[in-house]
């Protein structure tokens, strides 16, 4: 059979790859996308980590568990009596699966609508301008596709820890931790990073006693430390037992669970728990891509090397998303996908890596964009800070959500906004204003002179901007 020919072949249909494929097709490029993902029932499923076992299922569980927690602990304050509220974890999981299925099938629809040709199987580099697709049923012959341009978007997989081998029963990675059919009585988590905090929060809210072991002495070192310290206090108050400087030495089987031995300072400790989540980071995934034989350059940590335009060391081959440098975030990968598609089509696509928002979906949420105080101090940048607590926000008080603050950092001379950091209700939504402001190179004065509706949470951003100039009204 003659090779099939395309303008662009995308390998991987996560948020980087599927978005790249759709944008290529929109721009009139004849596009194919190869993906090997199978869901729990063996069905091919688009959307990669994000839709199948990442952003979407975790946020669905966070939402359900938030409702439950709210009803149990906050309804009374509003004068609402709810007797014997309980949570049906299998029902919560069923809802999550429905959300995931709806969205992954939605991408199938988008591929059809945009005429993106879908291949199910493993894609590998098979010489200049060629991709081989290994069908999922081994034994079938590889299909050969020719492409003028290849976009690699093969994503990432969880890092493993030899002291705590994953069996997806007692010791699980993030994928297993999204699947518990009942809240473990005692749940251990290795890693107080984004996944450890989000999934620890889910199971804590529905009744688990959660103990998080973090190797570093600092909590969330990438986050502005004023914000991180307030978040740490709040999470501890919610019942998360976060132990910093805790180095796991070994794990073993207990009668019905797991034992974990760890060192904290000079002290050796031992835990007995029902389940253990390992959430110590993720690594780029290039397995089965034939990358080395094809001569694709990778760095020491296994990321595919790319320039600022996502071009790899091979002509006509691009790489985007988690498999290349930069934050492992769905929206970062999607933006790279759009930019690469536009460059292939002769336009000048671009990603502003200085204005990529981060969100940790605990409650309150933690969100930020740009530089934090530690980074500015280290770089010797002269800055001024404006802080406004949600305690002084009428809307937050009305909501009963007055924990947290907004902090804006501006350049002392030019007043350009350098970073915005939020710990508070709906920080994930509030941060968008800060991203837009930074994208347009706004100053804190620009935000201070922008009218914000009253009463809204966004007024806290307005007030923090005023505070940067020492003229906040409500504090
Ligand atoms: P992936 O989503 O990993 O997709 C890669 C795809 O390529 C997969 O379908 C894979 O099967 C396929 N593939 C790999 N190799 C081949 C091959 N050789 N041939 C064919 N197909 C192949 N990010 C956020 O921004 N917000 C969040 O709230 C968030 N929550 C998360 C929660 C969890 C629990 C986890 C684990 C991650 C979360 N992330 C979140 C991170 C986010 O999921 C990733 O940054 C994002 O999925 C990366 O997108 P990608 O397209 O680069 O790769
Ligand atoms: P992470 O890098 O956020 O956190 C891992 C944590 O584990 C770190 O604090 C690290 O110090 C700690 N650690 C490493 N080795 C350890 C060890 N041996 N013992 C104890 N602690 C150890 O990684 P993650 O939480 O696994 O998440 C992976 C990535 O997925 C994130 O960095 C992020 O890019 C993405 N993600 C994003 C979101 C979001 O945007 N809301 C949610 C989940 C995941």
Image (cartoon, grey):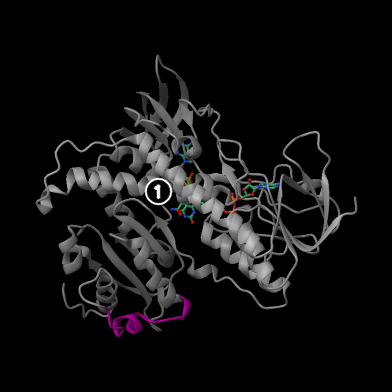
Q: Which residue is mark 1?
A: 60
Closer-to-camera residue (101/266): 101
Q: Which structural element holds mark 1?
A: helix
Residue at (51, 44) in percent of width and height: 53
Q: Is residue 393 visible?
A: no
Residue at (56, 29) in percent of width and height: 162
In the image, which residues are magenta? 439-452
Closer-to-camera residue (285/260): 285
CB at disc 1 and ligand 1 closer than 8 Å: no
Q: Quadrant of the C terminus?
A: bottom left
- The number of numbered discs placed on residues in the rendered structure image is 1
Against 124, residue 210 (above or below) is above
The image quarter containing residue 213 is top left
Residue at (33, 80) in percent of width and height: 447
Q: Indicate yes or no whether the magenta region holds residue 442.
A: yes
Residue 298 x %, y %: 71, 52
| Left or right for 148, reference 179 | right
| Left or right for 120, reference 59 | right
Residue 263 x %, y %: 40, 29
Residue 397 x %, y %: 16, 62
Residue 277 x %, y %: 44, 34
The image quarter containing residue 240 is top left
Q: Indicate yes or no whether the magenta region holds residue 74.
A: no
Residue at (43, 66) in percent of width and height: 369
Q: Residue furthest left?
A: 79
Mark 1, other Cα within 10 Å: few <14 / some 14–19 / many ≥20: many
Against 273, residue 414 (above or below) is below
The image quarter containing residue 413 is bottom left
| Left or right for 410, reference 322 | left
């Amino acid at each position: 059979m003659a090779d099939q020919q395309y303008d662009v072949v995308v390998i991987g249909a996560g948020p980087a790859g599927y978005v790249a494929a759709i944008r290529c097709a929109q721009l009139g490029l004849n596009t194919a996308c190869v993906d090997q993902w199978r869901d729990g029932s063996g069905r091919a499923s688009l959307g990669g980590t994000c839709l199948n076992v990442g952003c979407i299922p975790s946020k669905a569980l966070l939402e359900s568990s938030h409702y439950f927690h709210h009803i149990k602990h906050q309804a009374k304050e509003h004068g609402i009596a709810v007797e014997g509220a309980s949570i049906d974890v299998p029902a919560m999981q069923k809802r999550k699966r429905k959300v995931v299925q709806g969205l992954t099938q939605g991408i199938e629809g988008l591929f059809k609508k945009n005429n993106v040709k879908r291949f199910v199987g493993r894609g590998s580099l098979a010489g200049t301008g060629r991709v081989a697709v290994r069908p999922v049923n081994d034994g079938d012959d590889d299909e050969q596709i020719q492409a003028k341009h290849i976009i690699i978007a093969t994503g990432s997989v969880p890092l493993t820890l030899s002291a705590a081998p994953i069996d997806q029963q007692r010791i699980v990675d993030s994928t297993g931790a999204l699947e518990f059919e009942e809240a473990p009585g005692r749940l251990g988590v290795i890693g107080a990073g984004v996944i450890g905090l989000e999934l620890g929060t889910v199971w804590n809210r529905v009744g688990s006693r959660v103990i998080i072991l973090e190797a570093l002495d600092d909590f969330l070192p990438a986050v502005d430390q004023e914000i991180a310290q307030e978040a740490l206090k709040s999470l501890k108050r919610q019942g998360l037992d976060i132990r910093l400087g805790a180095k796991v030495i070994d794990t073993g089987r207990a009668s019905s669970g797991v034992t974990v031995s760890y060192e904290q300072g000079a002290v050796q400790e031992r835990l007995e728990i029902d389940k253990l989540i390992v959430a110590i980071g993720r690594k780029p995934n290039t397995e089965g891509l034939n990358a080395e034989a094809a001569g694709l350059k990778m760095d020491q940590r296994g990321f595919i090397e790319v320039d600022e335009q996502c071009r790899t060391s091979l002509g006509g081959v691009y790489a985007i998303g988690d498999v290349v440098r930069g934050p492992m975030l769905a929206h970062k990968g999607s933006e790279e996908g759009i930019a690469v598609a536009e460059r292939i089509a002769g336009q000048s696509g671009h990603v502003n890596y200085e204005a990529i928002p981060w969100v940790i979906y605990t409650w309150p949420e933690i969100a930020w964009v740009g530089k934090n105080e530690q980074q500015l101090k280290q770089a010797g940048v002269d800055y001024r800070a404006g802080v406004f607590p949600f305690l002084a926000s009428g809307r937050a008080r009305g909501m009963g959500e007055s924990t947290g603050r907004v902090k804006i950092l501006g350049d002392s001379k030019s007043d350009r906004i350098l970073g915005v950091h939020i710990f508070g209700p709906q920080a994930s939504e509030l941060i968008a204003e800060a991203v837009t402001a930074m994208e347009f190179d706004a100053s804190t004065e620009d935000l201070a002179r922008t009218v914000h509706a009253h009463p809204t949470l966004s007024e806290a951003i307005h007030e923090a901007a005023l505070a940067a100039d020492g003229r906040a009204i409500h504090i």
